[in-house]
């Protein structure tokens, strides 16, 4: 049967460096337990602010990976 099925989950990555670093961290960690991640879509980006300064970058990602039959 041709075609594939994909599952989608949301994850949030954080970093004190940048949004890109936060996204990389989220994908790298998720890759340790999910097989065959295909797409990461940025849903939202925000920052944590303390005393008028940015202290953390956060990225919410939608990850899709191939769903495998058990």
Image (cartoon, rainbow, N blue to C red):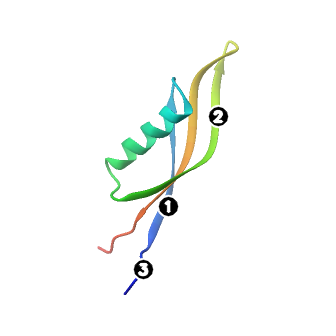
Q: Percent x, y for residue 12?
A: 52, 42
The quadrant of the image that shows the C terminus is: bottom left
Disc 2: which residue: 46
Q: Can you say whether 49 is above or below 45 in the image?
A: above
Mark 3, residue position: 3
Q: Residue furthest bottom?
A: 1
Decide which of tag 1 and tag 3 comes sooner along the chain.
3
Query: Is residue 31 shown left or right of residue 23?
Result: left
Residue 1 higher or lower than 52, as above or below: below
Residue lying farthest left? Answer: 70
Q: Quadrant of the N terminus?
A: bottom left
Give me the residue at 50% from left, 61% from top: 8
Decide which of tag 3 and tag 2 comes sooner along the chain.
3
Total of numbered circles in the picture? 3
Secondary structure, mark 2, is: strand
> Residue beneath label 1, please?
8
Q: Is residue 5 left or right of residue 18?
A: left
Mark 3–mark 2 distance (CA, rounded to whole Å): 36 Å
């Amino acid at each position: 049967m041709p075609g594939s099925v994909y599952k989608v989950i949301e994850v949030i990555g954080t970093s004190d460096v940048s949004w890109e670093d936060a996204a990389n961290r989220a994908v790298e960690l998720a890759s340790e337990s999910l097989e065959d991640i295909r797409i990461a879509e940025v849903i939202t980006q925000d920052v944590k602010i303390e005393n008028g300064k940015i202290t953390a970058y956060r990225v919410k990602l939608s990850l899709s990976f191939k769903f495998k039959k058990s």
